[in-house]
Amino acid sequence: MIQANTDAKWLPLYEALASEVRLAILNLLSAEAMNVKDIAAALGLSSAIVTMHIRKLEAAGLLHTRMVRKDGGTHKMCELAEQNIRIELPHKRDQAMKSHETMIPIGHYTECDIHPTCGIATRENFIGQFDDPRYFLDPERMNAGILWFGHGFVEYKIPNYLLTSQQPEALEIMLEIGSEAPGVNEHWPSDISFQLNACELGTWTSPGDYGNKRGKFSPSWWPESVNQYGLLKLIRIQEDGTYIDGQRMSNVTLGEIALHRNQWTFRIGVQPDAEHVGGVTLFGSGFGNYNQDIIFKVFYSE
């Protein structure tokens, strides 16, 4: 997901979207990768004009091209580079408030209940064997950059740096996450639930487990036949409820989750009796499309 805002550096993105032809190209590529000749034929345009539009979309980060050998020749194939765009407009209240930000590595969970299919890996190698939950307690897990499981949970402790004189106004949690299918499957829904301080924040249904192309930050040794990247999700808890990417997830408010504690407990899981038991894949630093672990940001006033 592209995280854009009103900074001038995002003008190429907005200019790329301000064209009926380029929007039509994005719609075509949402179904399958295509070469310039086929796109031109579908739109009734010349290859030269389509190439110009493709360059603008590439510059905006909306698609990328790759060379493929087919029918005895080499073809330049175009495919979507992103699935979502999130535009953050200036938020006067947040700008006026101060904040604390903490990044928690995905391997730093303090409790877990793991059921196959499952696995865990660092940037250098797999930890133990696939589908053996015992390795989720291996000390090397602290260096993990990716982990996945069929159902169960992982739970993290987050330090609370708020002083007694500081009043929390909002809390944001950002993470790259997806489903866990055997192999990869973009149509593999999973009901992933989130808890904070034992309070149910809500459930988000992940659409699938993505592997149609390599993760931008995945190490070179990482196999192409397994999880490659997830979706970047932003959970925000505030005084009127809990939201995920701006959509209401529950009515849980900031005042209900006991932020006065010295530490907070955050749980990510899939219940075995959920409607869609499609597992969880968590992507941390060194894997997926976003070079980050789980980010917690609390806004506060004095």
Image (cartoon, rainbow, N blue to C red):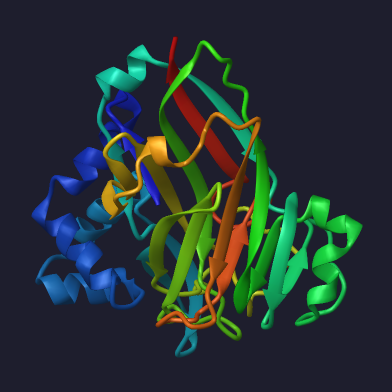
Q: Is residue 158 above or below residue 245?
A: above
Q: Nearer the viewer, residue 100 or 64?
A: 100
Residue depicted at x 15% and y 76% = 42
Query: Is residue 126 shown to the viewer in this render?
Result: no
**Left or right of 88, for residue 266:** right
**Left or right of 41, for residue 196:** right
State which quadrant residue 183 falls in.
Answer: bottom right
Q: Is residue 280 above or below residue 93?
A: below
Residue depicted at x 88% and y 57% = 140
**Left or right of 154, for residue 231:** left
Q: Nearer the viewer, residue 51 or 123?
A: 123
Give the image location of residue 283, x and y in percent: 61, 57
Give the image location of residue 197, x and y in percent: 55, 47
Query: Is residue 178 shown to the viewer in this render?
Result: yes
Q: Nearer the viewer, residue 235 or 1?
A: 235
Quadrant into which the C terminus falls: top left
Give the image location of residue 111, x and y in percent: 73, 58
Residue depicted at x 45% and y 79% = 274
State which quadrant residue 119 falls in.
Answer: bottom right
Residue depicted at x 35% and y 41% = 253
Give the image location of residue 85, x and y in percent: 31, 49
Q: Nearer the viewer, residue 51 or 111?
A: 111
Q: Is residue 242 above or below residue 100?
A: below
Q: Among all residues in the image, which is located at the extreme bottom?
A: 71
